[in-house]
Image (spheres, grey):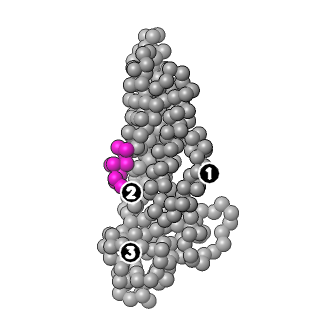
Amino acid sequence: MQLTAQRRLGLILGLALGLGYSLSSNLINNFFLPNIPLFVPWPGTAGLIILTTLMFGVLGLIAAWTEESLPGIIASALVGSIISSIWIILNETSNRTSAFIALFLVFLPRVFFYLPFSWLIRWLVSKLEVSAYQSIPPARRLLYVLITFLLAVFAGTFSLYPEEARQSLVKMDELIQLGMQASARDQLPKSLQSVEGFVSNANGKYNFTLGSDPDALPVQRPVVEFGAIESFIIIRFENGFRFGCVFSPPYVLPACIDF
C-alpha cells in the first residue's frame, strides 16, 4: 500500500472509531439520566462529539503516518495524551494547579491509554492492506472495521457514572425541586438549610457537575470506608448562584454548603 493511501486510510478509520466512541461516551449518561440537567462544557454535546471524532481522526492519521508501525503508534499515543490533558486542565475551573500536577503525574499512564487505539489503527490498516492483495471479499474486510467500531462504542460506555453517583444525582435533583418551592429557610430540606442564600438565589435553570475531590467541600460528613464512593456534586444556577453537596454512604442525605 502506498504511504499516501495508508495515511488516508488511517484518517478514515480514526474518524470512524472516534465517532463510535464519542457518541457512546457523550450520550450514555444522558440516556441513563434523561431528566437530570447534567453540565456540558463548551461547545455542547454535538460540538464535543464532533471535536472528539476529529481528534481521533488526527490520531489515526498520525498512527498511519510512518512506514514502520511502532513510531506512528507511539507518536499517536503521545499526541492523544497531550491533547486530552490540555482539555482537562482547561475545563478544570475549581483548581487548575492541582489538575495540572495530577495530570503530570499520570501522563505516562495516559499514554498507555491511547496506545491500544493507535495499535488498533495500524492493525486495521495492515489487515485491509493484506486483504486487498489476497482478494478477500470486501464483506470480510468490512467485518474487521465493524468489530472494532463496536469495540470503540463499548469503550465509550466506561464514561457512565457509577451507580452511586447516578442515584445521588437523582436525589439531588429531587432536593433542588423541593427547595425551590420553599419561601423560607426553615421550609427547606434539612440538607439545603446550610446553603446561604438558597431561598433568594435558587431561581431558574440549573445543572450538575460531578467533582473529583469531595474533600474540597468544607463540610462535616461521615467517615467512610477506604474505597467507598462519595459523590461530590456542584450545583450551578444560570444566575451565577452555586453550592456543593457530598453524598456519603448510605447516600440518603447530602452535606451541602456554599461553594
- Answer with mark 1 or mark 2, whichever residue precedes in sequence: 2
In the drawing, does residue 82 fall left or right of residue 19?
right
Q: CA distance from mark 2 to mark 3?
A: 18 Å
In the drawing, does residue 100 fall left or right of residue 59?
right
- Answer with mark 2 or mark 3, whichever residue precedes in sequence: 2
> How far from the left and from the top, in percent, is residue 159?
49, 50
Residue pictured at 40% horizontal, 81% vertical: 198
Q: Which numbered marker is on residue 105? A: 1
- Answer with mark 1 or mark 3, whichever residue precedes in sequence: 1
Give, as a three-letter code, the residue at label 2: Pro
> How far from the left and from the top, in percent, is residue 127?
49, 20
Q: Secondary structure at mark 3?
A: loop
Q: Secondary structure at mark 2?
A: loop
Q: CA distance from mark 1 to mark 2?
A: 24 Å
Residue pictured at 45% horizontal, 35% vertical: 59
Give, as a three-letter code, the residue at label 1: Leu
Q: Which numbered marker is on residue 41? A: 2
- Give the quarter of the figure containing the N terminus: top left
Work out which residue is located at the far left of the displayed protein and give it. 204
Report the residue marked by disc 3. Answer: 241
Residue pictured at 57% horizontal, 26% vertical: 70
The magenta region covers 40-51
Q: Quadrant of residue 38?
A: bottom left
Is residue 181 within the magenta segment?
A: no
Q: Eyeballing the image, is 176 above or below 114?
A: below
